[in-house]
Image: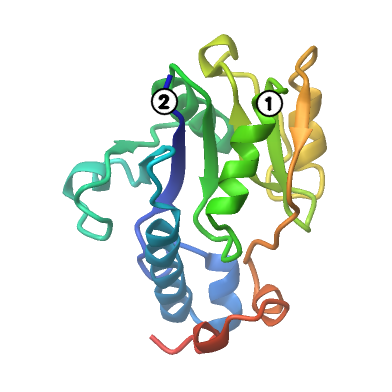
Amino acid sequence: MRRTVIVMVKTPRAGRVKTRLGRDVGMTGAAWWFRHQSVSLLRRLRDPRWRLVLAVTPDRDAVEGRNWPSDLPRSPQGRGDLGERMMRALRAAAPGPSCVIGADIPGIDRAHIARAFAALGEHDAVFGPALDGGYWLIGLKHPRRVPLQALRGVRWSSEHALADSTARLPGHRIGVIDRLQDVDTAADLARLAFGDDADLAP
């Protein structure tokens, strides 16, 4: 059964993506950063050990959008909160172990993904925690055995997101891998060593 990595992406339009960051650096700069970061991430994560696919919002851009590499499979994220959209993407990618990641974590590389799949060899689920109490990765060994509504009621965008999510998988053996920094604000950017990427000018 083939492994799958699903990247949740949003069309990088000013005022529609990374709006918290946009309040600090300007909406155009935030959209530019997200586009640059997403393209770089997708380039880094190509690997024959897994299939790389995109879950896109707005849904129409899964077909019409030109912001993403044309050779990568795409599907619309569909309706619902973040948990329902992630679970829908995981269940659609099955059979086989699958992981979902966000596109706004600059530190992700192939070694992190490989560790996530290795953890799924001994666990039913795996999480990659973020520094703010959320998480940048969720992986499931058997996605279709987990209900679509499994993550209902999680307090997203809060310090409770990881704890809420693990609590909603009772009876699952849960592994945890690397803790990484996501980017929601200019302060998050300041904590990361981007090199040339620190320049937010569009």
Q: Position of residue 4 (x, y in %)?
A: 44, 33
Q: Is residue 184 left or right of residue 19?
A: right
- Secondary structure type for disc 2: loop
- Asked whether disc 2 touches disc 1, contact meaning CB atoms under 8 Å apart, the reply is no
Work out whether 168 lies above or below 26. above
Q: Quadrant of residue 89?
A: top left
Q: Position of residue 48 (x, y in %)?
A: 37, 42
- Please state, as top left, top right, bottom left or bottom right, where the C terminus lies in the image: bottom left
What kind of residue is marked 1?
A: Ala
Q: Position of residue 146 (x, y in %)?
A: 60, 14
Q: Is residue 12 left or right of residue 103?
A: left
Q: Quadrant of residue 40?
A: bottom left
What kind of residue is marked 2?
A: Arg
Residue appearing at x 77%, y 26% in the figure: 174
Residue 51's label in the rendered image is none
- The residue at which mark 1 appears reads as 125
Work out whether 202 lies above or below 164. below
Question: Label 1: few (<14), some or many (≥20) within 10 Å?
Answer: many
Residue appearing at x 70%, y 63% in the figure: 181
Q: Position of residue 198 (x, y in %)?
A: 55, 86
Q: Is residue 142 left or right of residue 65?
A: right
Q: Earlier in the sequence, mark 2 or mark 1?
A: 2
Residue appearing at x 75%, y 22% in the figure: 168
- Secondary structure type for disc 1: strand
Question: Label 2: few (<14), some or many (≥20) within 10 Å?
Answer: few
Label 2 to label 1: alpha-carbon separation: 17 Å
- Please state, as top left, top right, bottom left or bottom right, where the N terminus lies in the image: top left
- The residue at which mark 2 appears reads as 2
